[in-house]
Image (cartoon, rainbow, N blue to C red):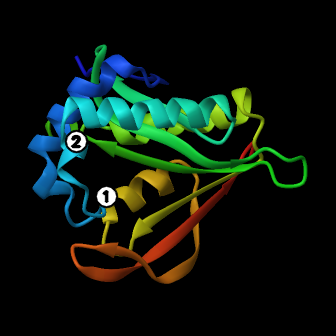
């Protein structure tokens, strides 16, 4: 039987499982994410990062979630850059799934659940995302969730020592 996928707001107690995934997957994620300081990979560093995310949540700027499979933390899904003003109402979705839980549909289901949070809880109108041009698995996740590419951000992120282009994605919520 396939495992269930849920998301919930991140908690400080998620620091240790997140750190364990990030230590194990450092090489797997190197192509897709910027370099991080050594402290990022420790439970203490993750607890500090989570405190910052929760402060941003209290301020209305971010909805930081964890992805759960059968109640175990397997990744994160975050709605950042929230602009709740009536004339903007948008946020940007980011996500990662631990290598031990990839290729099981969790990323797609987590993004779908995050889109519900964006619509039902946050009252947003527009969802945005970006992927590395070569990150085809992440692009499939976005396409399956109704996103469309709309442009390229040239030389937009420093990854593994080189500036890389990003593919920009959008979805109008409620469509």
Sequence-wise, the earlier of marks 2 and 1 is 2
Can you identify the residue that label 1 sits on? 137
- Secondary structure under the numbered disc 2 in the rendered image: loop
For the residues labelled 2 and 1, the Cα–Cα distance comes to: 10 Å
| Viewer can see residue 103 | yes
**From the viewer's perspective, is residue 68 above or below residue 84?**
above
Q: Is residue 52 left or right of residue 14?
A: right
Can you identify the residue that label 2 sits on? 102
Identify the residue at image location x=68%, y=34%.
59
Could you classify mark 2 by the number of other residues whose Cα lies within 10 Å: few (under 14), some (14-19), or many (20 or more)?
few
Residue 69 found in image quarter: top left
Residue 109, given in percent of the width and then of the height, sits at 43, 35
Identify the residue at image location x=72%, y=46%.
173
Identify the residue at image location x=19%, y=62%.
30
Label for residue 151? Answer: none
Q: Camera-side residue: 169 or 92?
A: 92
Residue 129, given in percent of the width and then of the height, sits at 54, 58
Residue 157 found in image quarter: bottom left
| Viewer can see residue 69 | no
Could you classify mark 1 by the number of other residues whose Cα lies within 10 Å: few (under 14), some (14-19), or many (20 or more)?
few
CB of mark 2 within 8 Å of CB of mark 1? yes
């Amino acid at each position: 039987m396939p495992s269930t996928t849920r998301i919930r707001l991140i908690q400080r107690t998620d620091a240790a499982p997140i750190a364990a995934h990030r230590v194990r997957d450092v090489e797997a994620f190197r192509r897709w994410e910027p370099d991080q300081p050594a402290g990022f990979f420790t439970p203490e560093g993750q607890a500090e990062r989570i405190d910052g995310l929760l402060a941003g949540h209290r301020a209305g700027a971010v909805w930081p979630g964890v992805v759960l499979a059968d109640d175990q933390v397997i990744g994160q899904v975050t709605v950042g850059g929230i602009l709740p003003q009536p004339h903007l109402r948008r946020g940007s979705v980011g996500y990662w799934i631990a290598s031990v839980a990839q290729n099981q549909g969790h990323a797609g289901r987590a993004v779908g659940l995050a889109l519900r949070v964006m619509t039902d809880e946050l009252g947003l109108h527009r969802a945005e995302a970006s992927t590395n041009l070569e990150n085809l698995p992440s692009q499939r996740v976005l396409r399956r969730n109704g996103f469309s590419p709309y442009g390229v951000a040239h030389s937009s992120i420093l990854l593994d020592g080189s500036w890389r282009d990003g593919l920009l994605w959008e979805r109008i919520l409620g469509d």
